Amino acid sequence: MNAEIEESIEYDEDDGEITTTTSGATKTTDKTWIENIEKKREDQQDLLNDFYAKKPQYFIDFLKSNNIPLDSYNIKDLPRFIRLKSLSDSLNQSLLAEIENQLKTKLVKIHWLPGFYKLQDSSVSISSSKAYKDGLIYGMDASSGAAILALDPKPGDNILDICCAPGTKLCMISDLMNGQGSLTGVDISRPRLGICKTLLNKYKIPNIRLFLCDGTAFNIKAPNPNDSIPLEILEKGKELKRIKLDKKCKEKKEQQELNDEDNENEKDKENNIKPLETSTTNNNNNNNTDIIDLKRKQQHYKSKKPLKKRLIDLEDLFYCKTFYMRHSNSQLYDKVIVDAECSLDASVRHLINYSKMGRHMVPEEFKKLTDLQKLLIQNGFNLLKEGGHIVYSTCSFCKEQNEDVVQWLLDNNPNAKLIPSFNNTTSIVEQDNNMSLSMDQLYNSETVPFSTGFIENTYRFYPKNGTSGMFISKIQKIKL
């Protein structure tokens, strides 16, 4: 996707809905496309029922080999959530009824996750509502929200999001920071980063920059508003300014020569000077005219300057509206989140839509994937300041992609310490007297509904507990 064109794509992470917009006005979406989306939602419930009635053997084998409870994916429907951009209680109360009316469904508050609501009817569309178009709500799964809850953004933080697209995590982080501090997002996919840019513009996210870069190689530090433009850039700017001035003088001289030739031709016409009636003279005159026309065309095309990045821009900068953040690169980040590429086996939607675990489960591909995850978490840890923390998460329940990656980081970094992600250190869903908690009870609880991971202070969000599947961990960089 070309990030500079006016037409863009709006993507809702939870819905998987895409709306084409031009200059802020929503285009009429193709009727057939809408019908396909609605049919897909209707079919999802049938696919879900069929999937659990006929669990493939490879899926059962996967659960057993990773010590995953066999009932972890047992759900009656696919829950969908929205988040209100503003967290003002008074504003929420005045808006909720109107939003419910627009969405044509009740909203169930998620008490353990600020600003989140479950759609009582998961089949409704949110992208057609006025609240969505006005940037008051966005679709985001509760498990993704839990990862941001673990990150614990505060006003004034400098935060790095590696694998940031499609952008709803950045929106939530910015809300919790009250727009104070800085946000840096990195992603390797240009189309997904273009979607991310669209979301950031739509929700008016301040103090943010995006980089089109491999997250394993990204090395730009956090910005500082007190940083001045580097001297070498200023010197280079002066040199380019001199070159530009020389070029402008040359173009002005060429333009003057063209004007002089035009004046000579006008004088010839006024004095009724007749050209010599020879074919050679006629040809010469025609040639002169052609030369003048060619020069004019050249002059015209010279004036059309191609769009270029600013001289001060950091390498791989894709999007930024805050001046100092375009060049500043001077301090480590307070907090980092790595929502790593994974096999998506924890995503029920992925499983029922594709009816397979995915290419990442092929042995040679699996090794590449876990190597990538280790490089991502290590690079994020390298960019973290002492005393700061990094959240590592995936949409997988595979131990090799989760606890093993975290343990690898701990083993290779003596200054890395695994710490609790949430205030509640015990799991309410694993206590014997709470085994029969209903979804409504889980949503009404102030306690985060995680299941404990395979090493201390790692967390799993199983679909049976009311969210999409997710693994979450939190590591602090300590002083040695």
Image (tube, helix red, strand yellow):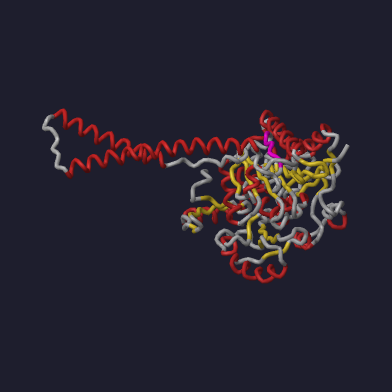
User: Which is more toward the observer, 156 or 11?
Assistant: 156
**Where 308 sits versus 138, above or below?**
above
Residue 454 locus on image (x, y percent)? 83, 41
**Residue visible at 16% across and 42% down?**
271
Q: Residue 128 versus residue 55: which sits nearer the camera?
A: 128
Q: In which quarter of the view is residue 443 placed? A: bottom right
Q: Height in image: 441 above or below 251?
A: below
Q: Residue 231, image x and y in percent?
A: 65, 37
Q: Is residue 119 left or right of residue 378?
A: left
Q: Residue furthest left?
A: 277
Q: Is residue 395 visible?
A: no
Q: Residue at x 67, y 39 (%)?
A: 341
Query: Magenta region: which residues?
Result: 217-221
Give the quadrant of the C terminus.
top right
Closer to the camera in the image, 35 or 42: 35
Residue 220 falls inside the magenta stretch = yes
Q: Is residue 221 visible?
A: yes
Q: Residue at x 52, y 50 (%)?
A: 8
Q: Who is closer to the viewer here, 249 or 278?
A: 249
Count of numbered circles in the view: 0
Q: Residue 323 in the image: x percent, y percent? A: 62, 48
Dominant SS in magenta: loop
Q: Quadrant of residue 311?
A: top right
